[in-house]
Amino acid sequence: MSTVATICARGGSKGVPGKNTRLLLGKPLITHTIEQALSCGQIDRVCVSTDSQEIADIARLAGAEIPFLRPAELATDTAGKLDAIIHLVEHLEATGANISRIVDLDPTSPLRALSDIDDCLRLLDDSCDTVITAFEAEKNPYFNMVEMGQDGDVHLCKRLGGPVLSRQSAPHVYSMNASIYVWHRQSLNKNLWSGRVKMHVMPRERSIDIDAPLDFRIVELILKDRQEPSRMENPPVG
């Protein structure tokens, strides 16, 4: 029984064209996630699902397996990511793989730590079907998120028995960051919310998903800041 990391990367990004192959601190974006997956001791295989030959070539060079180029119908703007993961896993099984766990790593979330992957895999046990990642939400539906009713009146999205006077006194809510998903093999074909779900909470600074050019710049700045302490500890010899 093995644990497979899936990395799904379409070639047709519209928000940031070519983002999976765009250089981030000298490496293609997808390479950061592949290297992280390869360094995780709990992962046995790292496989990329893509419709792009360019992405496939870069991923293979980084050490990932590319079992095929993804069919066009699974690479459209409206195609679900879960369908692409299931397609990849079923292909691996058809070639003899015996898979017990799947961990999906989004290549547009390179700020995750290796410890985040390890913690998610440890959370997956017999008491749950899936593990997701999220961060504490900046807005709270019990306090400062509203919706408009059919009559045009605006009200809070969620209400308690009495007034909520501050965000700190409201129930904690979280935003999914889509950085990591972990499933048992038998849970993969379930709807996400039809099973039992656990959550690994990540800090905001590790939860940025690159969906626009500004996101790319922010991620690059954060990664550069991470490198600064090592430069200070090892100053150049004059």
Image: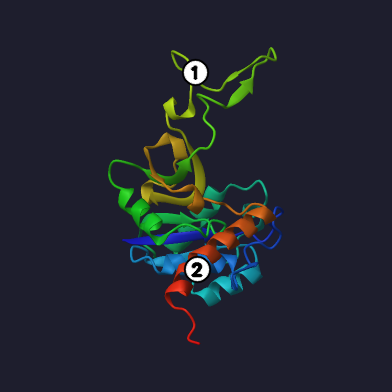
| Rendered image: mark on residue 159 | 1
Q: What residue is shown at x 70% (from left), y 15% (from top)?
A: 152
Q: Is residue 40 above or below residue 192?
A: below
* Residue type highlighted by circle 2: Glu
Residue 18 locus on image (x, y percent) = 69, 63
Q: Is residue 141 above or below residue 179?
A: above
Whole-angstrom CA distance, mark 2 to mark 1, is 45 Å
N-terminal of the two: label 2 or label 1? 1
Q: Is residue 92 above or below residue 162?
A: below
Q: Nearer the viewer, residue 138 or 5?
A: 138
Judge from the rendering whether residue 190 lies leftward or rightward of residue 109; answer left or right. Answer: left
Q: How is the rendered protein coloured?
A: rainbow
Q: Crowdedness of circle 2 by 10 Å Cα count: few (<14), some, many (20+)?
A: few
**Extreme residue toward the left, this view:** 126
Residue 34 visible within the image: no
Secondary structure, mark 1, is loop
Q: Is residue 60 above or below residue 223?
A: below
* Residue type highlighted by circle 1: Arg
Q: What residue is shown at x 71% (from left), y 59% (from top)?
A: 17
Indicate the quadrant where residue 12 lies. bottom right
- The image quadrant where one finds the N terminus is bottom left
Q: Nearer the viewer, residue 192 or 238?
A: 238
Badge 2 is on which residue? 228
Q: Crowdedness of circle 1 by 10 Å Cα count: few (<14), some, many (20+)?
A: few
Secondary structure, mark 2, is helix
- Foreground mark, 2 or 1? 2
